[in-house]
Amino acid sequence: MMGPLWKRRFRRVAWGCFAFWLFIVLFAHPFFAVVAPSGGEVLVVEGWMHDEGLKEAADLFNEGGYDHLYITGTPRPFAYYLHDGDTVVLRFAKPTNGTLLLGAAGLPGALWSLTIDGTASMSRSVTGDLQDNTIELHDARDIRIIAASNAPPPSGEPVLFLGRLWVDGRNAHLLGATITIHGTNGNKEPGRPTFAHEAYFILQGKGVPADRMTVVPTWVVDKSRTLSTARDLIALANTQGITSFDIATVAVHARRTRNMYRKAKGSPDGVGSLPCTTPGANDGPGG
């Protein structure tokens, strides 16, 4: 049993923990989720945000009187959901050699086939778990991955998930290949190699006009993803005469993001912050 002295110490520790928790609840979130619009007519959106965060960013743009929206983002994993009959096409700028690793999973009855420069090279059925397959490339220029299913769902859901495509350990998004998704309906969509490209399509679906958005991808990350995207956005802003803008990002990341953009700009002037506070919107690779 605890003596009187230990009981007093325990109560002090408990009250201290409670006071710390209360401080975090009352003050930490407002500190990080700084709301400080710049008054500018440009909105910058961090493309890695959760879908609900991007919905808030779309509302900010549509209702906030902004003229244009710029989307930042670093390379994302090679990940695509395909419907029965969809094809992912990669066209390399030059003949490519190396070991191609393809990771795929899917619904029961789903399978994929791989062609290299028009020649059928591999075909596999899939399970619910991501499974890797490798094949050697020799002066390859055109790679096609075709999704199929022996029992496509009547609801029209995707049947195949491509979760990895690497060449010699490098994400195919970083290889300079042109990526296109050919749908069974005849539509062709460009690939989404960065979180900026991905967010561009999501924001279109949330009502932001395509002609009022500009994708600003960051291909080279130097230590900090946020500072690297800020560097590239500021470089573009300087060429276009943009001196003030607001950044929409997740709440807990807002103050750090604003600081990184100020650092990249070399001045705090004209850098505003608008946190997206949707619960669950703070999942992402910000750093």
Image (cartoon, grey):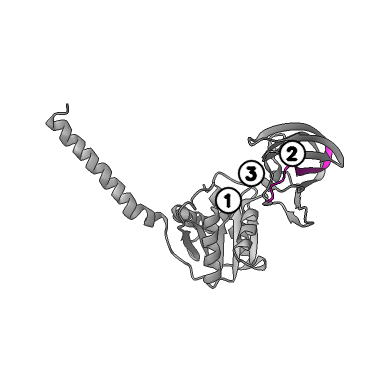
Percent of width and height locating residue 163: 66, 41
The residue at 56%/67% (across/down) is 42
Q: Mark 3 = which residue? A: 77
- Residue 252 is left or right of residue 99, and the answer is left
Q: Element at badge 3?
A: loop
Q: Nearer the viewer, residue 261 or 10?
A: 10
The residue at 64%/37% (across/down) is 128
The numbered mark, 1 or 3, whose residue comes first in the sequence reads 3
Are there few (<14), some (14-19), or many (20+) residues within 10 Å of tag 3? some
At label 3, the amino acid type is Pro
Spatial separation of the CA atoms under disc 1 and disc 3? 18 Å
User: Which quadrant of the figure contains the N terminus?
Assistant: top left
Hey, which residue is sitting farthest right in the picture?
118
Q: Mark 1 = which residue? A: 228
- Between disc 3 and disc 2, the foreground one is 2
CB-based contact (under 8 Å), mark 1 and mark 3: no
Magenta-span inclusion, residue 130: no
Percent of width and height locating residue 80: 67, 46
The numbered mark, 2 or 1, whose residue comes first in the sequence reads 2
CB-based contact (under 8 Å), mark 2 and mark 1: no
- Residue 79 is left or right of residue 17, and the answer is right
The overriding secondary structure of the stretch rendered in magenta is strand
Question: In which image quadrant can residue 243 be found?
Answer: bottom right
